[in-house]
């Protein structure tokens, strides 16, 4: 066992750095793809921006503050709005604040990268010209990837790294499930579009939102909604597929606790393990038959419970447990 | 940008003996600077500032709610200390720290120095930093001031004086290390041909000193750095030192005292801590022992310390020796404990609690620098020659209301170093804060932090008051034919 287990506060911060950087990446990814897709769609398809707000899960807040889901409003809300706890600017600020408080734990390279990203976003004009947007979203994604790469390449793959990664993987699974949920139901009823080029454009955009278009092609070839669901939900190799993310998160958790795979030592491990097994042994067909939305809804609830259990198992203080590193910590001196 | 038109303005200049007359130790550096292509120095300066911002080497300004993080301005022109002069300074610092430590230990035990009448007992008991709670405490090895920063200044005649001692939680050493790093990265040319003593061994020395405080006989020791948190003005330094030493950086809420010992709260339960490098003031360290309203501290920490279950650096209560009135007696303290005259002189100081001194101070406020006995960071200070009548009146009233809390010193004409101001070199006043570690033996970091008052004519070098810093080079070898400077002739 590591002689120096992480401080609970530090583990908490690392987990949230992982989540927030991944969240910023995903918001930029969704917004960037939407922007491009709009160029291919007829003018009346503005409802796509509404879908983007729905994906972020902040529908109500948005409508109270902005009203109509126009491109300009949605981008302002998702990118720079300081009052939106999930805007890119806020995600980066929070990630940086967390990184600042654990500067001794992360590598200097990681700190400098998140700090650079923070300085850059805060120096950007809060109303970007439309023609500057694609490049902006691209850069956010690349900056986030640079952070992830530095995390993997400059930090020991220890307990701290596993908490960062755990946050990242759970956040990614959450975001993929949201975009799948929103888009599947938006796209499916448009019976009139089925088989038209628009249908293809929109489903391709879903895949591109998770950088999955090319990998999907290699796996399944032609666009088909059910296979897209299979790919994004159940694929064991694609890094943004929910199943893949849950597998990784489960591995992180076992690395943290030292519990052998297939068993559990705490509530978070049990809940994550149950979810992982279910994904192992479920057919996409049966999910679609009993309702994808219902399945994804239940998935969200379960991931929230896993999040709560992680908080209780690791971040809250357990005064009752002593680490017997030296075996003589009490009474003998 | 050339140094050839640089004016010393009649001040003691660390680089020039007179206009057009570089000091021998500075000649090579000045030649390098003067041979740079036009604009190169300003480009280096901008690169250095960008680097500092990206590395997040910033400090927080308390009174400033908007952009609360600022870089500590860094001037590219280093300050050079000749090898011979440093040898003398280092000897003086060792002697001073050794004596101050003996003084603190005496004050919290037998108080022989008070009984012998060397210092009036009242001066010690009335010091705000005196902690009766520490009476009878026995820190490991009898050491109370493990990490000290001693502020030195040079007056017009070249004499170096100790301006003040910082024994509680001195900060700034991270800037010494980062300034060197940034200068090497942005302006490597200036190092050519010179043998400059490296500074990067400091974290190892600090770690070694801290580990030497652990209770003996443990198979492994756990040392942590205790910070007030990410919003403290010196947070960068706390995280930097923790990172450089490979130690955990903890906040008060990460620690808990249980069954008489100190533990960190970890993901795997509570884990024992043996040594704490604390960067929290005494007052906030333990609400059970000191200020009850402190949210930053750890309840029960002092009791654990008293029982020997954990070591603290610096030792609580050591601030009694850096009170500004006690400072006045340091030459006597050195003579009393060391049996020798002090190597480094004090600045002559008037103590307002003495009637005759107070009258002199009140009559000469426009010529003197007045300081509150218990403040640091350039707060609570009046610089007479730069003050308004209203400010002088305010201080006169304060002195009369609480004479024990004020001292006054003649306004020293601090030495200057060429500094880049806009697009030319101008002289700016500097001080020097060397850092001293006291563990198994005494270690002095070569050089220290040169702080520079960037405002024209200003004598206040504190970062909170418009100060910046410079890299400080201690030369490894004597410069041929260079006489020992005035300060070293004592």
Image (cartoon, coloured by chain):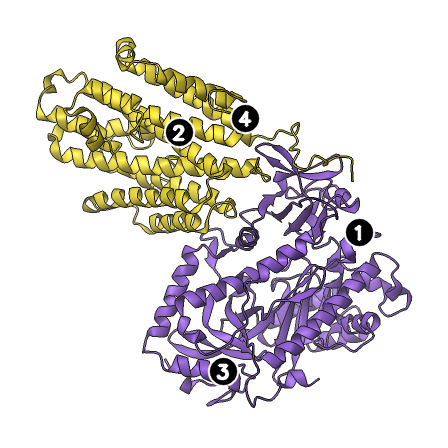
Chain colours: A yellow, B purple
Identify the subunit bearing mark 3: B
Identify the subunit bearing mark 4: A
Residue B411 in sight in this render: no
- The mark found on residue B107 in the picture is none
Same subunit, tags 2 and 3: no
Q: Nearer the viewer, residue A190 or B127?
A: A190
Relative horizontal placement of residue A210, taking residue B240 as reference (left or right):
left
Q: What is the C-alpha distance between the residues marked 4 and 1?
A: 39 Å
When the figure is inspected, residue A183 is found, relative to residue B140, above or below; the finding is above
Relative horizontal placement of residue B55, taking residue B167 as reference (left or right):
left
When the figure is inspected, residue A63 is found, relative to residue B171, above or below; the finding is above
Relative horizontal placement of residue B53, taking residue B311 as reference (left or right):
left
> Marks 4 and 2: CB-CB under 8 Å?
no
Between disc 3 and disc 1, the foreground one is 3
Give the mark, 3 or 1, whose residue is nearer the N terminus.
Answer: 3
Quadrant where the image shows the N terminus of chain A: top right
Give the mark, 4 or 2, whose residue is nearer the N terminus.
Answer: 2
- Mark 4 highlights which residue? A312
Between disc 4 and disc 2, the foreground one is 2
Residue A198 in the image: state x and y as whole percent.
11, 26
**Label 2 crowd bin: few (<14), some (14–19), many (20+), radius 10 Å:** many
Between disc 4 and disc 1, the foreground one is 4
Quadrant where the image shows the C terminus of chain A: top right
At x 56% / y 54%, what residue is drawn?
B241
Residue B371 in the image: state x and y as whole percent.
67, 67
Q: Nearer the viewer, residue A118 or A148?
A: A148
């Amino acid at each position: 066992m590591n002689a120096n287990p992480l401080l609970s506060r530090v583990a908490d911060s690392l987990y949230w750095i992982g989540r927030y950087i991944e969240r910023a990446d995903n918001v930029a990814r969704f917004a960037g793809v939407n922007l491009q897709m709009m160029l291919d769609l007829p003018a009346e398809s503005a409802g796509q921006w509404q879908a983007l707000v729905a994906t972020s899960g902040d529908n109500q807040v948005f409508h109270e503050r902005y009203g109509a889901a126009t491109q300009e409003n949605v981008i302002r809300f998702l990118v720079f709005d300081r009052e939106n706890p999930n805007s890119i600017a806020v995600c980066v600020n929070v990630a940086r604040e967390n990184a600042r408080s654990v500067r001794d734990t992360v590598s200097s390279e990681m700190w400098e990268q998140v700090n650079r990203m923070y300085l850059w976003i805060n120096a950007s004009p809060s109303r970007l010209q439309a023609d500057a947007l694609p490049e902006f979203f691209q850069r956010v994604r690349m900056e986030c990837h640079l952070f992830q790469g530095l995390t993997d390449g400059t930090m020991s793959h220890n307990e701290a790294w596993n908490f960062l990664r755990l946050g990242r993987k759970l956040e990614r699974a959450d975001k993929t499930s949201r975009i799948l949920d929103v888009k599947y139901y938006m796209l499916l009823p448009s019976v009139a579009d089925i088989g038209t080029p628009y249908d293809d454009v929109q489903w391709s955009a879903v895949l591109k939102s998770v950088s999955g278009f090319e990998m999907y092609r290699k796996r399944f070839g032609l666009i088909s909604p059910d296979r897209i669901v299979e790919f994004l939900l159940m694929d064991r190799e694609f890094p943004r597929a929910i199943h893949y993310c849950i597998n990784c998160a489960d591995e992180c958790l076992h690395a943290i606790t030292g519990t052998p795979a297939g068993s559990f030592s705490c509530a978070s491990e049990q809940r994550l393990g149950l979810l992982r097994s279910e994904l192992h042994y479920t057919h996409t067909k049966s999910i679609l038959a009993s309702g994808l939305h219902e399945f994804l809804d239940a998935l969200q609830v379960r991931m929230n419970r896993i999040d709560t259990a992680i908080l209780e198992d690791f971040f809250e203080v357990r005064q009752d447990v002593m680490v017997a590193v030296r075996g003589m910590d009490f009474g003998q001196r | 940008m050339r140094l050839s038109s640089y004016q010393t303005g009649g001040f003691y200049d660390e680089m020039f003996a007179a206009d057009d007359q570089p000091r021998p130790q500075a000649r090579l550096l000045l030649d390098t600077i003067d041979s740079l292509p036009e604009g190169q120095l300003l480009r280096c300066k901008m690169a250095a500032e960008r680097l500092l911002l990206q590395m997040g080497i910033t400090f927080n300004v308390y009174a400033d709610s908007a952009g609360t993080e600022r870089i500590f301005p860094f001037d590219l022109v280093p300050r050079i200390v000749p090898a011979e002069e440093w040898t003398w300074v280092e000897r003086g610092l060792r002697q001073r720290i050794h004596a101050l430590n003996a003084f603190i230990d005496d004050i919290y035990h037998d108080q022989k120095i008070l009984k012998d009448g060397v210092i009036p007992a009242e001066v010690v008991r009335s010091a705000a930093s005196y902690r009766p709670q520490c009476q009878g405490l026995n820190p490991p090895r009898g050491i109370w001031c493990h990490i000290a920063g001693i502020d030195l200044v040079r007056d017009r005649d070249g004499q170096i004086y100790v301006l003040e001692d910082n024994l509680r939680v001195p900060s700034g050493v991270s800037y010494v290390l980062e300034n060197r790093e940034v200068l090497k990265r942005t302006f490597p040319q200036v190092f050519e041909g010179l043998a400059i003593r490296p500074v990067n061994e400091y974290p190892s020395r600090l770690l070694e000193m801290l580990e030497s405080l652990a209770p003996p006989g443990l198979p492994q020791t756990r040392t942590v750095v205790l910070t007030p948190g990410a919003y403290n003005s010196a947070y960068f330094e706390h995280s930097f030192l923790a990172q450089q030493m490979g130690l955990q950086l903890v906040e008060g809420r990460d620690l808990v005292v249980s069954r008489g010992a100190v533990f960190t709260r970890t993901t795997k339960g509570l884990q024992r801590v043996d040594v704490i490098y604390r960067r929290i003031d005494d007052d906030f360290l333990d609400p059970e022992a000191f200020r009850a309203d402190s949210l930053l501290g750890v309840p029960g920490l002092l009791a654990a310390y008293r029982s020997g279950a954990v070591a603290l650096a610096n030792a609580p209560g050591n601030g009694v020796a850096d009170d500004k009135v006690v400072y006045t007696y340091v030459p006597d303290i050195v003579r009393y404990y060391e049996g020798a005259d002090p190597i480094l002189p004090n600045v002559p100081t008037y103590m307002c609690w003495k009637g005759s001194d107070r009258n002199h101070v009140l009559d000469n406020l426009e010529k003197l620098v007045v300081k509150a006995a218990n403040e640091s960071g350039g707060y609570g200070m009046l610089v007479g020659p730069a003050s308004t009548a209203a400010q002088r009146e305010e201080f006169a009233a304060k002195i009369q209301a609480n004479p024990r809390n004020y001292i006054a010193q003649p306004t020293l004409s601090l030495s200057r170093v060429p500094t880049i101001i806009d697009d030319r070199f101008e002289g700016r006043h500097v001080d020097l804060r060397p850092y001293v570690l006291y563990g198994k033996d005494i270690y002095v970091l070569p050089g220290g932090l040169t702080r520079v008052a960037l405002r024209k004519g200003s004598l206040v070098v504190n970062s909170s008051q418009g100060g910046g810093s410079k890299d400080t080079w201690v030369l490894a070898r004597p410069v041929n034919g260079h006489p020992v400077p005035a300060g070293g002739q004592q």
